Image (cartoon, grey):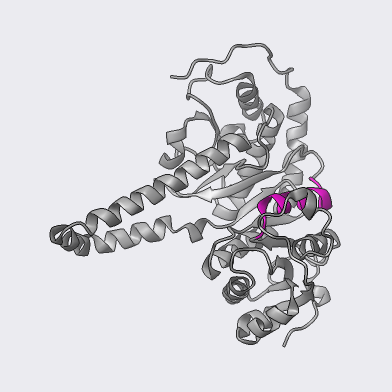
Amino acid sequence: MMTEPTPASMPGKPPGEEPFTLAVDAMGGDRAPDIVVQGLGIAAERHPEARFLLVGDEARLIPLLDRNRRARGACTVLHTAEAISGDCKPTMALRMRQASMRLAIDAVASGQAHGVVSAGNTGALLALSKIVLKTLPGIDRPAMAAIMPSARGDVVMLDLGANVTCDARNLVEFALLGDMFARTVLGLTAPTIGVLNVGSEELKGDDRVRNAAEIIRQSHIGAQFAGFVEGHDIAAGKTDVVVTDGFTGNVALKTGEGAVKLVTDLLRQIFASSLTTKMGYLLAKPGLEQMKLWLDPRRYNGAVMLGLNGVVVKSHGGTDAEGFAHATDVAIDMVVHHFNDHIREGLGRLGDVMANSPPPKAGAALAAAR
């Protein structure tokens, strides 16, 4: 039976062993609301203290909840029949005040929930979050961050498309956000940080990346700064955090996804090409299954919009229930570990460095790529 959120589940109560609430856009995504409810059932089993404010069409949600006992016990439904479509422009989405995504974000702004999870329209989610929640004091622009696989373990990369162009200050802020994200979600005590560039030498790149690197070196996370990294260093896992602008980050992300798909398709073709290769597949199957699990995109589902006054997690629109549950796990980690409180503390320390740093060097020519 669904119940109303109790006072203990409100944001005023410190999260941890006590219940806390996430607002969930039930109607966002290619297979919503079915996989959303199934995913919340998985998340509720992993996190018994979590409560979910499920925003969407109750005529579709209640039958699904009736068939999923775990989700039903953790969810409260907030009814709305309006939803933002995948092809809806952000300017139009801003006018849809009763849409499920908008009401879920409103719940965070009003204090009904600690964070929001949606598999819906990315542009709409970013625009609505920036307008409704606004950025944290000291953050110029929010950044989209996600976890990617590498040869040495998981890597945090940001920005992945929220900001096409960035200046040095933005990149410094992204470094701070990425540092805290890696601590919170990956459990690293001192994650190494690199700025993506056309070469690893200090003189490579433009004024923007060189100025950002200099400020990071002088900041409280300077000891963790490993300098510049190149594209191939991402998959190699040279650093735990990779910082870049949204244009470059999005291209790198999509390139990596395409490379993984290419390798997977080629392996499938090779092992199906002859009797000999089919026999080889049987011998290699345990290792291939391990690799498949390691590269499973559901493990990396859940891009986070960092720097906002509230936790906002974007699930991939085409994910399944396990993938949506993982995106919910990411949001829960950020809530339980008081992510934004740590960001506020870090921003205070970073502000002193920014105020005392020399003015940006201007006019230097772009260093030639190796």
- The foreground one among 90 and 300 is 90
Q: Residue at x 76, y 62 (%)?
A: 114
Left or right, 296 with reference to 274:
right
Q: Residue at x 74, y 79 (%)?
A: 58
Left or right, 17 with reference to 190:
right
- The foreground one among 164 and 135 is 164
- The foreground one among 18 and 129 is 129
Q: Position of residue 260 (x, y in %)?
A: 40, 49
Q: Position of residue 25 (x, y in %)?
A: 71, 66
Is 284 included in the stretch rendered in magenta? Answer: no
Question: Most prominent secondary structure in the magenta stretch?
Answer: helix
Q: Position of residue 40 (x, y in %)?
A: 62, 73
Q: Position of residue 56 (x, y in %)?
A: 74, 72
Residue 111 to residue 257: above or below: below
Q: Quadrant of residue 167?
A: top right
Is 126 included in the stretch rendered in magenta? Answer: yes
Left or right, 300 with reference to 130:
left
Magenta segment, which residues?
120-135
Q: Quadrant of residue 30?
A: bottom right
Residue 78 to residue 207: above or below: below
Q: Residue at x 84, y 55 (%)?
A: 95
> How many numbered tags mark residues here?
0
- Rendered-image quadrant of the N terminus: bottom right
Residue 273: tell me if it is visible.
Answer: yes
Residue 357 to residue 255: above or below: above
- The foreground one among 288 and 241 is 288
- Rendered-image quadrant of the C terminus: top left
